[in-house]
Image (cartoon, grey):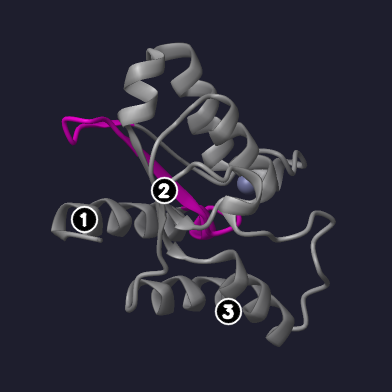
Amino acid sequence: MVDDADLAHLRRCVALARAALEAGDEPFGSVLVDAEGRVRFEDSNHVAGGDATQHPEFAIARWAAEHLTPEERAAATVYTSGEHCPMCAAAHGWVGLGRIVYATSSAQLASWLAELGVPPPPVRTLPVNEIAPGVPVEGPVPGLDEEVHELHRRLHG
Ligand SMILES: [Zn+2]
Protein backbone atom coordinates (compact mmCIF):
# COMPACT_ATOMS: atom_id res chain seq x y z
CA MET A 1 0.00 0.00 0.00
CA VAL A 2 1.31 3.42 -1.01
CA ASP A 3 1.21 5.97 1.85
CA ASP A 4 1.95 9.71 2.09
CA ALA A 5 5.68 9.15 2.66
CA ASP A 6 5.79 6.92 -0.42
CA LEU A 7 4.00 9.60 -2.44
CA ALA A 8 6.49 12.26 -1.34
CA HIS A 9 9.40 10.09 -2.54
CA LEU A 10 7.61 9.34 -5.82
CA ARG A 11 7.03 13.07 -6.38
CA ARG A 12 10.78 13.58 -5.97
CA CYS A 13 11.36 10.87 -8.63
CA VAL A 14 9.02 12.65 -11.04
CA ALA A 15 10.82 15.96 -10.34
CA LEU A 16 14.17 14.26 -11.11
CA ALA A 17 12.65 12.87 -14.32
CA ARG A 18 11.43 16.33 -15.32
CA ALA A 19 14.87 17.85 -14.59
CA ALA A 20 16.51 15.14 -16.71
CA LEU A 21 14.18 15.92 -19.61
CA GLU A 22 14.89 19.63 -19.28
CA ALA A 23 18.64 18.84 -19.31
CA GLY A 24 18.24 16.99 -22.63
CA ASP A 25 18.01 13.46 -21.25
CA GLU A 26 15.24 10.88 -20.95
CA PRO A 27 12.68 11.50 -18.18
CA PHE A 28 13.43 8.90 -15.53
CA GLY A 29 14.30 9.55 -11.87
CA SER A 30 14.81 7.28 -8.85
CA VAL A 31 15.45 7.57 -5.10
CA LEU A 32 16.91 5.08 -2.58
CA VAL A 33 15.36 5.33 0.90
CA ASP A 34 16.61 3.39 3.94
CA ALA A 35 14.57 1.63 6.63
CA GLU A 36 14.47 4.85 8.69
CA GLY A 37 12.93 6.77 5.79
CA ARG A 38 16.10 8.70 4.94
CA VAL A 39 16.99 9.39 1.30
CA ARG A 40 20.46 7.85 0.79
CA PHE A 41 20.98 8.30 -2.96
CA GLU A 42 19.12 9.66 -5.95
CA ASP A 43 19.79 9.86 -9.64
CA SER A 44 18.23 10.42 -13.01
CA ASN A 45 18.72 9.05 -16.48
CA HIS A 46 22.06 9.84 -18.18
CA VAL A 47 21.81 8.08 -21.54
CA ALA A 48 22.14 11.24 -23.64
CA GLY A 49 25.94 10.89 -23.49
CA GLY A 50 25.69 7.70 -25.55
CA ASP A 51 25.77 5.00 -22.83
CA ALA A 52 22.29 3.45 -22.86
CA THR A 53 22.98 1.60 -19.58
CA GLN A 54 23.11 4.83 -17.53
CA HIS A 55 19.75 4.28 -15.80
CA PRO A 56 19.15 5.66 -12.30
CA GLU A 57 18.02 2.29 -10.90
CA PHE A 58 21.28 0.68 -12.05
CA ALA A 59 23.24 3.51 -10.39
CA ILE A 60 21.26 2.95 -7.19
CA ALA A 61 22.03 -0.80 -7.18
CA ARG A 62 25.75 -0.12 -7.58
CA TRP A 63 25.74 2.62 -4.94
CA ALA A 64 23.87 0.33 -2.52
CA ALA A 65 26.28 -2.56 -3.09
CA GLU A 66 29.18 -0.29 -2.22
CA HIS A 67 27.70 1.63 0.71
CA LEU A 68 25.05 -0.51 2.45
CA THR A 69 25.20 -3.82 4.29
CA PRO A 70 23.13 -6.72 2.95
CA GLU A 71 20.63 -6.14 5.79
CA GLU A 72 20.36 -2.42 4.98
CA ARG A 73 19.84 -3.18 1.30
CA ALA A 74 17.07 -5.68 2.03
CA ALA A 75 15.28 -3.14 4.24
CA ALA A 76 15.64 -0.25 1.75
CA THR A 77 13.02 0.90 -0.75
CA VAL A 78 13.70 2.10 -4.29
CA TYR A 79 11.22 4.65 -5.60
CA THR A 80 11.22 5.33 -9.31
CA SER A 81 9.26 7.32 -11.86
CA GLY A 82 9.14 4.31 -14.21
CA GLU A 83 9.29 0.61 -13.37
CA HIS A 84 12.77 -0.92 -13.61
CA CYS A 85 13.80 -2.29 -17.01
CA PRO A 86 15.11 -5.90 -17.04
CA MET A 87 18.73 -4.73 -16.69
CA CYS A 88 17.92 -2.65 -13.61
CA ALA A 89 15.57 -5.26 -12.14
CA ALA A 90 18.41 -7.78 -12.42
CA ALA A 91 20.88 -5.40 -10.74
CA HIS A 92 18.31 -4.70 -7.98
CA GLY A 93 17.85 -8.44 -7.45
CA TRP A 94 21.56 -9.26 -7.54
CA VAL A 95 22.47 -6.73 -4.84
CA GLY A 96 19.54 -7.80 -2.63
CA LEU A 97 17.61 -4.54 -2.48
CA GLY A 98 14.09 -4.53 -1.03
CA ARG A 99 10.76 -3.05 -2.07
CA ILE A 100 10.21 -1.16 -5.31
CA VAL A 101 7.52 1.51 -5.69
CA TYR A 102 7.03 2.95 -9.16
CA ALA A 103 4.81 5.75 -10.47
CA THR A 104 4.36 4.15 -13.89
CA SER A 105 4.67 0.57 -15.10
CA SER A 106 6.77 -0.81 -17.95
CA ALA A 107 3.51 -1.86 -19.62
CA GLN A 108 2.26 1.75 -19.51
CA LEU A 109 5.54 3.04 -20.97
CA ALA A 110 5.46 0.46 -23.76
CA SER A 111 1.90 1.44 -24.72
CA TRP A 112 2.72 5.18 -24.60
CA LEU A 113 5.79 4.74 -26.81
CA ALA A 114 3.77 2.65 -29.26
CA GLU A 115 1.10 5.41 -29.38
CA LEU A 116 3.84 7.97 -30.03
CA GLY A 117 5.24 5.88 -32.87
CA VAL A 118 8.56 5.24 -31.09
CA PRO A 119 10.28 2.01 -32.26
CA PRO A 120 10.44 -0.72 -29.58
CA PRO A 121 13.62 -0.72 -27.45
CA PRO A 122 16.35 -3.34 -28.06
CA VAL A 123 15.59 -4.92 -24.66
CA ARG A 124 12.13 -6.31 -23.89
CA THR A 125 9.98 -4.54 -21.32
CA LEU A 126 9.05 -7.06 -18.63
CA PRO A 127 7.51 -6.66 -15.16
CA VAL A 128 10.15 -6.54 -12.38
CA ASN A 129 8.85 -9.79 -10.90
CA GLU A 130 9.54 -11.64 -14.17
CA ILE A 131 13.23 -10.87 -13.53
CA ALA A 132 13.43 -10.66 -9.72
CA PRO A 133 10.50 -12.72 -8.38
CA GLY A 134 11.13 -12.10 -4.67
CA VAL A 135 10.99 -8.30 -4.74
CA PRO A 136 7.82 -6.63 -3.36
CA VAL A 137 6.61 -4.25 -6.09
CA GLU A 138 3.91 -1.55 -5.98
CA GLY A 139 2.53 0.75 -8.67
CA PRO A 140 1.45 2.38 -10.86
CA VAL A 141 0.16 5.34 -8.86
CA PRO A 142 -2.86 7.18 -10.30
CA GLY A 143 -2.21 10.88 -10.90
CA LEU A 144 1.57 10.60 -10.96
CA ASP A 145 1.40 8.23 -13.92
CA GLU A 146 -0.31 10.95 -15.99
CA GLU A 147 2.46 13.42 -15.07
CA VAL A 148 5.10 10.97 -16.28
CA HIS A 149 3.09 10.27 -19.43
CA GLU A 150 3.22 14.00 -20.21
CA LEU A 151 7.04 13.99 -19.85
CA HIS A 152 7.29 11.18 -22.42
CA ARG A 153 4.94 13.04 -24.76
CA ARG A 154 7.29 16.06 -24.48
CA LEU A 155 10.36 13.88 -25.16
CA HIS A 156 8.91 12.28 -28.28
CA GLY A 157 6.48 14.99 -29.40
ZN1 LIG B 1 16.91 0.34 -16.48
**Which residue in the structure is indicated by mark 3?**
153
Q: Amino acid at mark 1?
A: Ala
Query: For the residues marked 2 and 1, what is the alpha-carbon distance in whole angstroms?
Result: 19 Å
As helix, strand or loop, the secondary structure at mark 2 comes to: loop
Q: Earlier in the sequence, mark 3 or mark 2?
A: 2
Q: Nearer the viewer, mark 3 or mark 2?
A: 2
Q: Which one is nearer the viewer's eye here, 3 or 56?
A: 3
Left or right side of 96 for 152: right
Q: Is residue 49 above or below residue 105?
A: above
In the rendered image, residue 73, in percent from the top left (x then y), is placed at 39, 24
Disc number for residue 124: none
Q: Earlier in the sequence, mark 3 or mark 1?
A: 1
Ligand 1 lies under 8 Å from the Cβ of mark 3: no
Q: Quadrant of the C terminus?
A: bottom right
Q: Amino acid at mark 3?
A: Arg
Question: Residue shown at 42%/79% (left/top)?
Answer: 146
Query: For the residues marked 3 and 1, what is the alpha-carbon distance in whole angstroms?
Result: 23 Å
In the rendered image, residue 101, in percent from the top left (x then y), is placed at 38, 53
Q: Is residue 80 above or below residue 66?
A: below
**Which residue in the structure is indicated by mark 2?**
136
Which residues make up the magenta segment? 20-40
Q: Earlier in the sequence, mark 2 or mark 1?
A: 1
Question: Badge 3: how crowded within 10 Å, few (<14), some, or many (20+)?
Answer: few
As helix, strand or loop, the secondary structure at mark 1 comes to: helix
Question: Residue shown at 59%/65% (left/top)?
Answer: 106
Question: Which residue is at the far bottom?
Answer: 115
In the rendered image, residue 12, in percent from the top left (x then y), is placed at 30, 52
**Which residue in the structure is indicated by mark 1?**
8
Q: Nearer the viewer, mark 2 or mark 1?
A: 2
In the rendered image, residue 110, in percent from the top left (x then y), is placed at 67, 72
Is 13 inside the magenta-drawn segment?
no
